[in-house]
């Protein structure tokens, strides 16, 4: 049996701003937009993963906290330049860690994204499944 993360659920203080950001920054595509339990719910695909936005500000910051979620790319330098052109302000540049490099992206709704690229030819064999 193989399991995978289906989606990350994000409470969105300004849903349209969040959707616009993920569309422009990561080529997100809305695949479902409907009303559930009295609020707009939007599923967006980024690659094979999904974000689930709930059109409501967090009711409990501690219970709803997400430190970050990861988006893997095959060209971090290009993605970084795209984010800079969109006006994203970074506290630190790209961090290089041998077979992996990443940048932490501040997104709407106080969400933090680890945007990363992996050189699979350099990944230790025992870690290769982690990045597929």
Image (spheres, rainbow, N blue to C red):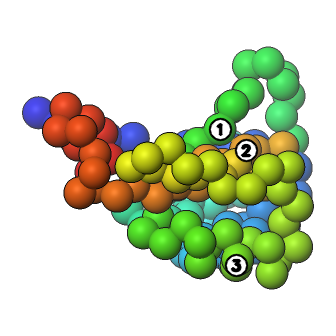
Disc ID at residue 112: 2
Task: Tell me what residue is drawn at x 65 percent, y 38 percent.
Answer: 68
Q: Which residue is mark 1?
A: 68
x%, y% of residue 120? 27, 55
**From where the camera sits, is residue 60 visible?**
yes
In the image: residue 69, left or right of residue 130: right
- Between the C-alphas of marks 3 and 2, the distance is 17 Å
Where on the picture, by quarter, is residue 59?
top right
x%, y% of residue 36? 64, 49
Disc ID at residue 82: 3
Q: Looking at the picture, tell me which residue is in the foreground, 123 or 79.
A: 123
* The N terminus: image quadrant: top left
Disc ID at residue 31: none
Disc 3 secondary structure class = helix
In the image: residue 100, left or right of residue 34: left
Q: Would you call the spot at circle 3 few (<14 residues within 10 Å), some (14-19), or many (20 or more)?
A: some
Is the Cβ of the residue at disc 3 closer than 8 Å to that at disc 2?
Answer: no
Task: Tell me what residue is drawn at x 55 percent, y 50 percent.
Answer: 96
Q: Earlier in the sequence, mark 2 or mark 1?
A: 1
């Amino acid at each position: 049996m193989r399991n995978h993360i289906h989606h990350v659920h994000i409470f969105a203080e300004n849903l349209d701003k969040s959707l616009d950001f993920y569309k422009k920054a990561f080529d997100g595509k809305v695949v479902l937009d409907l009303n559930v339990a009295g609020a707009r719910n939007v599923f967006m695909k980024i690659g094979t993963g999904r974000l689930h936005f709930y059109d409501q500000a967090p009711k409990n910051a501690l219970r709803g906290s997400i430190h970050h979620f990861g988006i893997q790319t095959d060209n971090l330098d290009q993605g970084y330049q795209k984010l800079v052109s969109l006006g994203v302000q970074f506290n630190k540049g790209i961090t290089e860690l041998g077979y992996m490099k990443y940048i932490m992206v501040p997104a709407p709704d106080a969400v933090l994204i680890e945007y990363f690229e992996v050189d699979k030819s350099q990944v230790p064999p025992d870690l290769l499944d982690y990045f597929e």
